[in-house]
Image (cartoon, rainbow, N blue to C red):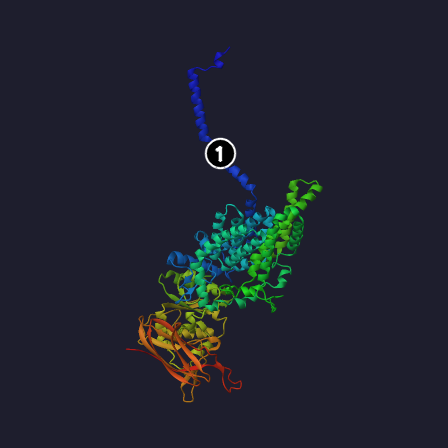
Amino acid sequence: MDLGAGVQSPQMQGLSVQIQTASTTETARTSPAPRRANDRLHFLRTLLTRPTFWAFLGSLLLAAIFGRVTLLHLGGGIMGGRADGYENLWNDYWVRTALFQLHQNPFFSGWIEYPLGTSLRFHTLNPFGALLSLPVAPLVGGIAAMNLKILFALVCCTFFAYLLIRDLTGSPLASFAGAVVYTYANDRMVLHYLTGTENYLMGGAMFPLYGFFLLRAATRARWRGYAAASVATLLALALTDWQYTLFAILFTLLFFVVAAFQRRDPRAIVALLVRLGLVGGVWMAIVGPTLLLPMFAEGRREPWLAFGEWQAPGNSKALIDFVRPGYQNPGYFVLIVMLVGLALFWRRPDLRADRAAVVFWAIVAGSGLILSLGPNVQPRLDHETAIPLPYAVMTRLPLLSISRKPFLFYTSFAMLGIGVLLAFALRTLFPVIARWRVRQALTPGATRLISGVFVSLLLVGTLLPTLRMTREGTFTAPDWPKFYTDVLAQDPESYAILETPLFVRQRGRSDAVYQAFQIVHHKYRFGSSVARDHKADNPDLFIRHATLFRDFFNVTPSIIDSYRPAKTPDFLSTPDYGVVGLPLLNYYHVRYIVLYINALGEGKPDDTDSARDLVMQALGPDARPVYVDAEMEAYRVPDAPPLAAPVFIDTGSIGWWRAEKTPAGMPYRWADTRNGQPAELVLFNLSGETRKARVQFTTYNYKAPRTVSIAIDGHSVEQFALAPNDAREVSLDLDLAPGMHRIALSTPQPPIPVEGSAGRDNRLLSFGVRQVRVQEIGK
């Protein structure tokens, strides 16, 4: 017997212990790598079994398919450059400049509509989109970052809608189908994608994300985190697009009303109100004093912003859009499947618990469809009836009067509702396929395959019109002018450039493209491309009123002659541009005058010659351009000594009929006060210090008694009554600050027709002015 076989000596035992210890140590050294490999493999296997992962992958794939042209031109041009693309590029530039260079509020810019600047609160600035581009733009460039944001918005539209619909239906395949229909089976994707309106695409993505968080906050036991996410998403929407913020607010109100009606339990209703009220209250506490209240104040102060009412009909859905084939609607396939599926859904008692959700989303879809029709019913867009709709009432509310695109209700409310209803319908139809599978003795895998093929065929048939529309893109290459890249961009000094024409619509270019040039040259400009002000609707725009500058603004000689007559005497001495031109340009730090020859050539034939003549009047007859190419001529503004008499007055560009003469030869003008507009004089002090000045003129009345009010820069300084055919001498002693001042003469009484004109004179007259003069006091 080998006794040693079962018993070891102490030496052997020690050796065994050493070997075992060494083996354990080696195992400890080598085991983490296999464990990490196993962990990664387990994570990968888990990921591949998650429907959410495949939904995100599908969202990426669809964005690549529908945005294929953008991928091929990622850095070569702005998508929608002839529409909103370059405006969005400037938005990103301005937000970065304001926040990180100027350290100021980005909702005001003094770099456009110089020297007064302009508010950007009603402009589609999209600061949230600009913040998203911050880490990307330095890596790929601003243009590629803009295009990537558009593609990313498409991805998020589908994926966020999927998250919402999956929570409602529990069916990943049906939810993805509904999300795809929401994103691509309507004209939002085509129009906003092709025109580069990233704020609408981003709003379309965040709207279902807000619904996802809000519904979880309203229904989950652990709801506070979802409520915080709802507030964050609503804040992001407010910094993206106010119309989609409105949609989110209306969605919240609609959800509360419908849920309260369905629950009927007072305690449940109060609990829901507390949760939703917390979301709305926290959001309002943040945006109220910072954004909303200033917007309310600005809207009341600037009523010209509210022109959505007359634009809304052209941006509404027509009844024919809902029935004709094309990308304007989801199509007949979706409609048939949705109606059949919902009919089967309603007949199944085991799905009774989901009826409340189906009813709510049907109300959401119906509300969106009705509001998208605009203020009045339109069978076709070129045929508006007098039948009023709820949208007309909504736009009379404060701030909502700026809303001008009713069709967005279709692309948000209606399409999200249709996507949810389609998912419920598909989820109901899948068991029908399963029963057919049982009868055919097919495997469960075959059932899933058949369901997937059915959904795929449905989506392919639905999305083909959209796919055809996106086979080409509206790209505009960044054709930066050489003068800006090679001259102005290399000059670190801060000054303004005076461009004409200031507001441009030409082939391949728009106001937004000219504003985007600022990204290159970084100089102040007198024009702008601002939402709701593309055609200089702003009555306070400096360049519309200021002497010399308004001539470059209008260019056309016949318009200039109305306030600066060259061949007839006026009721005040017209400033000589040969005397005041250079000092005026120097005072406002204008270094270059830029004539866009190609854009002037698309106007009236004599506009180019008129612009060059203005340059010669201001800079002198020997002025020559310092830069010339096929697009522009640039003139350097030389320095000049200040005016010996820096205080002077001029005729305003609004509120006057043309100058006339009395039988005795005295020039005068009747005020043109139609529509309540004032008659304006412009007063300058180019000294750089406050000067005392006296403005004098004679006012006289026409036929009817009236009151005349005088205001300077919006502040009332005098008011008096005039009897019929009465006259009054006016003398205003002013402490005149440096710069331009607007003297506005107005009357609350309407003007009246010219007596006894018998159709020969169709003017409406109120009061007139003659013998206008100004002098410095104490000089």
For residue 423, above or below residue 655? above
Q: In which quarter of the image is residue 379?
A: bottom right
For residue 487, above or below residue 213? below
Residue 569: give x, y in percent of width and height: 41, 83
Residue 186 seen in this snapshot: yes
Write the residue at 66% across / 50% down.
Answer: 346
Write the residue at 49% across / 72% down.
Answer: 603
Badge 1 amino acid:
Arg
Nearer to me, 376 or 66: 376
Does residue 178 appear left or right of residue 486 in this picture?
A: right
Total tally of numbered discs in the picture: 1
Residue 81: give x, y in percent of width and height: 50, 61
Nearer to me, 230 or 450: 230
Residue 482: give x, y in percent of width and height: 43, 62
Which residue in the rendered view is the most extreme toward the top? 1
Label 1: few (<14), some or many (≥20) within 10 Å? few
Q: In which quarter of the image is the C terminus?
A: bottom left
For residue 211, above or below residue 449? below
Which residue in the rendered view is the most extreme toward the front? 266
- Residue carrying label 1: 35
Write the residue at 55% across / 65% down.
Answer: 393
Which residue in the rendered view is the most extreme toward the right? 439
Which residue in the rendered view is the most extreme toward the bottom? 664
Does residue 447 appear left or right of residue 134 in this picture?
A: right
Nearer to me, 48 or 485: 48
Query: What element does badge 1 sit on?
Result: helix
For residue 529, above or below residue 743? above
Residue 577: give x, y in percent of width and height: 38, 76
Residue 64 seen in this snapshot: no
